[in-house]
């Protein structure tokens, strides 16, 4: 089986040179009710490619900021505590975006929100370069996080709608491209740093190029659903979605173990070198991206609930291997952990959006995303506090306990049967 099997169909179509007119003819009889007159609207393959680009931009912009944090800190003479406050502002802005995004996307449509959100997100990246102190940095970071939060929910909502036009699961490929965008952004950041490119030039170049790319691609995104209504101003996890919210919280809490602590753990608890620490982070990130590409095909061959339970067990094995605290075994452990976590969030979002919870798709996604981001924000703080009181090795134990909780929660999830929605076109 070739690697092309795991690429989004829209990307394969580009390589194959499939004619758009032929594809439109094939879909015309099934899509007349849902395809407006504007060119590109309602074509699932085009929409999939466009949303994949949006996910890649989300990852690339965030990685661009992350790799230049030391440079921003040095230019503003900030301490580690000051940077922590700035990151808290970013997290707070993201949470505000997630909490309010459900009703915004439902009311204005995902395509319009993505366009505005990408503008806020990309221009706030550029705005970071004109800050003159901690107060202004926190303010811009809050706007930066808000743009990321609303765009994230809108992109996921688009992904769920596009997925309904396909016979199987495709959400994993979108999240894989977020990871891929992050790797590209980090790689370009490393190059920019090595050649001495200033932060202002670096952020301006990335922000403008990716914003233009996103706006051009957004033409192919699905328009607002004709039956979309309005909902509550703030979306909190509901009782009917509690199982999916628990999965989101636990998955992103554990993900923080690999993202934030892998390199530190390998250099301290496992006694590795800085190179080994970087290798551990690369192993985790690489298997996360690979696992998200493979997740869609794995779900097609197994019940989604069974898939979630199996991946939770794989994640537990990964954490257990890291607790051995030997460089090589720990690197393997982080790789296994990334593979186990890779498909959890996209599959949980897809199931939650397909579950009849009395909420529109956008608000269901916002609720699960809010719970997940809560875990992502709380995880590093909890692990750091336990590590300071005991050791980083001991601090990883609660994450192992959460994998056990995930195994139990997956058995309580409602059974969701995916079907192609009325008016959607099977791709």
Image: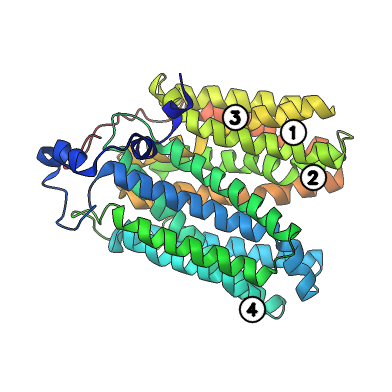
Which residue is labeled 1 in the image? 397
Judged by depth in the image, the label closer to the viewer, 3 or 1, is 3
Q: Where's residue 265, x and y in %?
A: 81, 39
Q: Marks 1 and 2: CB-CB under 8 Å? A: no
Question: Regarding mark 1 in the picture, which secondary structure is present there?
Answer: helix
Give the CA distance from mark 4 to mark 2: 37 Å
Judged by depth in the image, the label closer to the viewer, 3 or 4, is 4
* Quadrant hosting residue 330: top right
Question: Regarding mark 4 in the picture, which secondary structure is present there?
Answer: helix
Which residue is labeled 2 in the image? 386
Residue 391 visible in the shown view: no
List the single residue furthest toward the right: 271
Which residue is labeled 4 in the image? 130
Identify the mark nearer the N-term, 3 or 2.
3
- Closer to us: 293 or 196: 196
Q: Where's residue 228, x and y in %?
A: 23, 55
């Amino acid at each position: 089986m070739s690697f092309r099997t795991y690429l989004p169909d829209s990307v394969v179509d580009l390589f194959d040179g499939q004619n758009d007119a032929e594809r439109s003819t094939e879909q015309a009889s099934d899509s007349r009710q849902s395809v407006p007159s504007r060119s590109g609207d309602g074509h699932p393959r085009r929409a999939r490619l466009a949303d994949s680009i949006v996910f890649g931009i989300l990852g690339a912009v965030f990685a661009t900021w992350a790799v230049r944090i030391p440079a921003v800190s040095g230019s503003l003479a900030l301490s580690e505590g000051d940077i922590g406050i700035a990151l808290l502002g970013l997290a707070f802005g993201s949470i505000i975006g997630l909490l309010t995004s459900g009703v915004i996307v439902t009311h204005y449509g995902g395509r319009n929100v993505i366009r505005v959100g990408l503008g806020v997100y990309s221009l706030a990246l550029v705005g970071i370069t004109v800050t003159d102190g901690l107060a202004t940095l926190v303010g811009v970071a809050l706007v930066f996080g808000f743009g990321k939060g609303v765009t994230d929910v809108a992109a996921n909502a688009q992904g769920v709608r596009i997925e309904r036009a396909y016979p199987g699961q495709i959400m994993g490929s979108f999240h894989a491209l977020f990871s891929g965008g992050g790797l590209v952004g980090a790689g370009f950041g490393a190059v920019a740093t090595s050649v001495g490119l200033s932060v202002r030039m670096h952020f301006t170049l990335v922000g403008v190029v990716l914003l233009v790319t996103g706006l051009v691609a957004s033409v192919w995104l699905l328009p607002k659903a004709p039956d979309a209504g309005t909902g509550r101003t703030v979306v909190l996890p509901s009782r009917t979605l509690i199982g999916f919210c628990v999965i989101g919280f636990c998955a992103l809490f554990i993900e923080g173990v690999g993202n934030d602590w892998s390199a530190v753990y390998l250099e301290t608890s496992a006694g590795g070198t800085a190179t080994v620490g970087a290798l551990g982070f690369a192993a985790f990130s690489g298997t996360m991206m690979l696992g998200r590409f493979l997740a869609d095909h794995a779900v097609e061959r197994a019940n989604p609930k069974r898939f979630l339970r199996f991946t939770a067990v794989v994640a537990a094995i990964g954490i257990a291997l890291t607790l051995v605290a030997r460089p090589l075994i720990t690197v393997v452990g982080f790789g296994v952990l990334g593979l186990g976590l890779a498909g959890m969030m996209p599959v949980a979002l897809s199931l939650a959006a397909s579950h009849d919870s009395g909420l529109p798709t956008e608000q269901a996604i916002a609720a699960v995303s809010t719970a997940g981001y809560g875990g992502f924000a709380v995880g590093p703080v909890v692990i750091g506090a336990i590590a300071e009181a005991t050791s980083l090795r001991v601090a990883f134990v609660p994450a192992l306990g959460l994998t056990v909780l995930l195994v139990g929660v997956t058995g309580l999830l409602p059974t969701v049967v995916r079907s192609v929605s009325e008016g959607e076109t099977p791709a």
